[in-house]
Amino acid sequence: MNYTFDTICATATPLSTGGIGVIRVSGENSIEIVQKIFNKKIVPKIINHGWILNNGKKIDEVIVLPFVAPHSYTGENVAEIQTHGSPVVINEILNLILENGARLAQRGEFTKRAFLNHKIDLSQAEAVLDLINAKTTKSAQGAANNLSGALKIKIEEIKTQISDILGRIIASLDFPEDVAEVSYDEIIEKIENSIKNIEEILKNARIHNILRQGVKIAVAGRPNAGKSSLFNALLNIDRAIVTEIEGTTRDTITETLDLNGISATLIDTAGIRNESADKVEKIGIEQSKSAIEQADVVLCLYDGQVGINDKDREIFELAKNKKHLIVCTKCDLCPSISQNGEISISSVTKEGIEELKNALYKEIIGLNPTENEFLTNQRHQNCLKLSLEALNNALEGANQQELQDLISIDLKAALTNLGEISGEVITDNILNNIFENFCIGK
Ligand SMILES: Nc1nc2c(ncn2[C@@H]2O[C@H](COP(=O)(O)OP(=O)(O)O)[C@@H](O)[C@H]2O)c(=O)[nH]1
Ligand SMILES: [Mg+2]
């Protein structure tokens, strides 16, 4: 692939008022270009303090950090300018840099160059994006691990296992006189081992998808069951939504909470006012229906003072095809009601709220996440699954003592698919897809 590395620039900080603004310039001429608008000689490897000038007019007092290739984020010459955090100043300096020969960077172009210049592999480039977008500490941690190369190292390990056996098969086929045929037992053992390793990474894929994307939790139940009160108790805020504002047209309200590392969006139904009791029940069911439809997990609430009746069952029925928990509310008013291991809570005394959070976590994740430091995204998972498929074909062939020539074809396919994760085997299309999700300036 041919890439032209002209000089690009962008603001690395949001274009809004702040303490400082950072402008990044990368490419062969980056330092020269910045030199043209800086009032002192830029010395590499030190912090350069001075003024940005426009035709002799002082624009801002700044710090210029020059990085000489290959010792920079992108692997190219880079000049970073720290300005005062004014959008007007940042824009003016950016325009000066553009006038002097740079062009505006595309989304993710700095990180893309870091990848193309072999500073990082593709899984690390994606980790940069994941880290920026992480919603909880846990997903940030996973991204940071990948950034430091955890996934890359693991994939390399599996690739080495496969390459070893593939290399020996090919050698014995090419030089039958000198190299002994590899035994089928050994081929089977090595393939099984690689399969096990890939399955291990994929095992937590669902959990990682949840960590990455978050979950939606509906709070469903009859009017007065205590939904809004629980919503507030879970969020730990005192927002006056227990009684809804009259005339509101939205039928659901959402807020996000960090549920032991999962980004969970809670969905509550809006309050109903000025309606007859019958109509209130009917609207309540409709609203619960709409909240449940949007959710991945449903909390089915009933008023502990009343117990479960047919109207509750009607609502619970709506959630039967989703993950759900039955929750008995207002337990401060009726401590003895809890039945069948259901969770009893009180939004007033906060009794049972922590238990509910733990139960929710378990319900969402299915089991406690094993210590698996590899955060995989959909693209990695697809590559891993394709590789697994090829390995399973190879294993079947080996079990049937097929010609080793044929087995080697599947092993090569398995390697190619793994190579896509790190970006060894990569097309422009895949690259563009990945970097389009970045922000400008990263
Ligand atoms: N004592 C007590 N009252 C509660 C509790 N949860 C809700 N309530 C009361 O029950 C009524 C209905 O609660 P609300 O959360 O608005 O129910 P929603 O219609 O399901 O949203 C309100 O008067 C709340 O103050 C609780 O845990 N303990
Ligand atoms: Mg309510």
Image: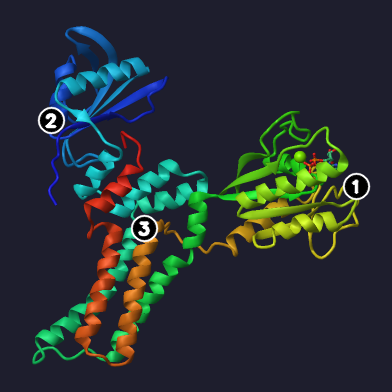
Q: Amino acid at mark 1?
A: Leu
- Residue at numbered disc 2: 29
Mark 3 burial class by Cα count in 10 Å: few <14, some 14-19, many 20+: some
Give the alpha-carbon distance from disc 1 to disc 3, as whole Å.
51 Å
Does the beta carbon at disc 1 come under 8 Å from ligand 1? yes
Q: Nearer the viewer, residue 68 or 233?
A: 233
Residue at the (41%, 75%) spot, across then down: 196
Name the quadrant containing residue 337: bottom right
| Residue 97 seen in render | yes
Q: Nearer the viewer, residue 286 or 433?
A: 286
Q: Position of residue 165 (x, y in %)?
A: 24, 80
Q: Earlier in the sequence, mark 2 or mark 3?
A: 2
Quadrant where the C terminus is found in the figure: top left
Q: Amino acid at mark 2?
A: Asn
Name the quadrant containing residue 258: top right
- SS for tag 2? loop
Q: Nearer the viewer, residue 243 or 111?
A: 243
